[in-house]
């Protein structure tokens, strides 16, 4: 369960799994065992910890030995060392934490963050952009330009020589690619087919900067955060591609890893998962948020105009808004007001 959903199963979930997968006396025994565990007031905590770690390590090494035999038969020697090292680490904490008295030099390093540029004119106001493990959002109403804003940020990172992954959950990979063509070459989206030579030439120039861009489509409501994490691992193991930054267009369209009675709880779980993905892969992640009705037809977008994704706002490091005044659209159809609604890395 943990390997699939990246979280510890609750007792109620364990009971559901047992009811689904077990029968007869074994089912009754396991359900009774779960109820007993729920009632236990744990004593001798350190002994239980030590015993649990030892059990996890023994089981992990045992399973690893079977995997090593399979790899050996298939001549997959490169993966054997890593698998054995990971198995030996089972049950051990990865990080002991920041020692305040001993790690003074570490926390006082001026450039402890390594931000990745989003849009040059905005970077100075958002700490240079998000850094590893941070999560940022563009917030706007339907049709307010969220996707094109994300494309602009992703293109900026690409032209800075970064490896970029752009997940699209609404549009096809080719359509998103055409949006990149339009932004990078400063041509109208409807005119990209008329500038094929220019687009090819510019792509060759950008490739020399050292970065790369992967655009990956998943169907709306079909992919979970685990789907995206599995794709990132596949890119690294198969193609040797390690992303510097990820864009998700957009998080509300992901499928939650668990079922909830209320939509807001589902959305909260999605954005907690995105934050976990940013931390696990040590990359910044950009996504988009949609405003509610009060955020439409106004250039004064605020945090209070967000839809049902309050959990995303709590988890975010940066929130940028896009607002458009309907009274100005006739004279300035491309005008919009950009706001910085949340910024943990500088003055808001």
Image: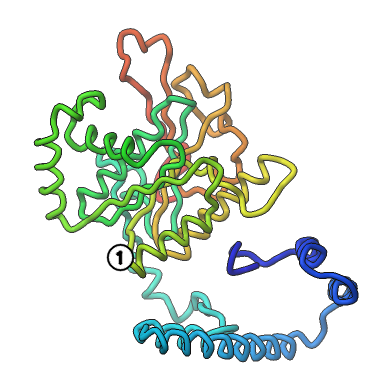
Residue in the foreground of this view, choosing between 32 and 264: 32
How many marks the image carries: the answer is 1
- Asked if residue 187 is positioned above or below residue 112 in the image, the reply reads above
- Residue at which label 1 appears: 239
Judge left or right: residue 12 versus residue 171.
Answer: right
- Asked if residue 42 is positioned above or below residue 251 in the image, the reply reads below
- Asked if residue 197 is positioned above or below residue 311 in the image, the reply reads above
Question: From the image, which quarter does the N terminus lie in?
Answer: bottom right
Residue 348 location in percent, x, y?
A: 43, 40
- Asked if residue 6 is positioned above or below residue 326 in the image, the reply reads below
Residue 46 location in percent, x, y?
A: 72, 88
The image quadrant of residue 103 is bottom left
Judge left or right: residue 262 versus residue 178.
Answer: right
Q: Most extreme residue toward the front, as rendered?
A: 73
Q: Badge 1: how crowded within 10 Å, few (<14), some, or many (20+)? A: few
Residue in the foreground of this view, choosing between 248 and 295: 248
Residue 191 location in percent, x, y?
A: 20, 25
Which residue: 27% across, 35% down?
178
Element carrying mark 1: helix
How did the renderer colour the structure? rainbow
The image quadrant of residue 245 is bottom left
Which residue: 41% across, 75% down?
104
Residue 153 location in percent, x, y?
A: 31, 42
Which residue: 27% across, 51% down?
213
Judge left or right: residue 150 versus residue 314.
Answer: left
The image quadrant of residue 144 is top left
């Amino acid at each position: 369960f943990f390997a699939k959903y990246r979280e510890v199963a609750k007792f109620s979930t364990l009971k559901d799994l047992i009811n689904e997968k077990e029968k007869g006396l074994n089912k009754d025994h396991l359900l009774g065992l779960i109820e007993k565990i729920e009632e236990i007031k744990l004593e001798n905590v350190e002994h239980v910890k030590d015993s649990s770690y030892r059990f996890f390590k023994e089981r992990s090494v045992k399973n690893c030995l079977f995997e090593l035999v399979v790899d050996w038969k298939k001549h997959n020697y490169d993966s054997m060392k890593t698998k054995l090292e990971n198995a030996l680490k089972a049950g051990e904490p990865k990080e002991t934490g920041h020692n305040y008295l001993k790690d003074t030099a570490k926390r006082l390093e001026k450039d402890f963050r390594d931000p990745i540029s989003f849009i040059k004119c905005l970077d100075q106001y958002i700490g240079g952009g998000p850094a590893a493990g941070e999560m940022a959002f563009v917030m706007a109403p339907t049709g307010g330009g969220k996707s094109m804003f994300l494309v602009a940020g992703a293109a900026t990172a690409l032209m800075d020589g970064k490896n970029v992954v752009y997940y699209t959950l609404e549009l096809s990979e080719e359509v998103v690619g055409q949006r990149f063509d339009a932004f990078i070459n400063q041509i109208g989206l409807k005119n990209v087919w008329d500038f094929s030579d220019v687009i090819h030439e510019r792509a060759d120039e950008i490739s020399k900067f050292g970065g790369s861009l992967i655009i990956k489509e998943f169907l709306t409501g079909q992919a979970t955060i685990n789907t995206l994490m599995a794709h990132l691992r596949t890119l690294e193991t198969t193609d040797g591609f390690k992303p510097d930054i990820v864009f998700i267009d957009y998080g509300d369209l992901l499928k939650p890893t668990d079922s909830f009675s209320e939509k807001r709880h589902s959305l909260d779980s999605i954005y907690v998962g995105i934050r976990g993905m940013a931390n696990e892969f040590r990359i910044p992640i950009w996504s988009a948020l949609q405003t509610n009705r009060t955020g439409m037809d106004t250039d004064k977008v605020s945090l209070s105009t967000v839809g049902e994704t309050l959990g995303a706002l709590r988890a975010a490091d940066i929130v940028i808004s896009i607002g458009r005044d309907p009274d100005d659209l006739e004279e300035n159809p491309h005008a919009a007001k950009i706001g910085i609604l949340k910024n943990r890395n500088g003055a808001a």
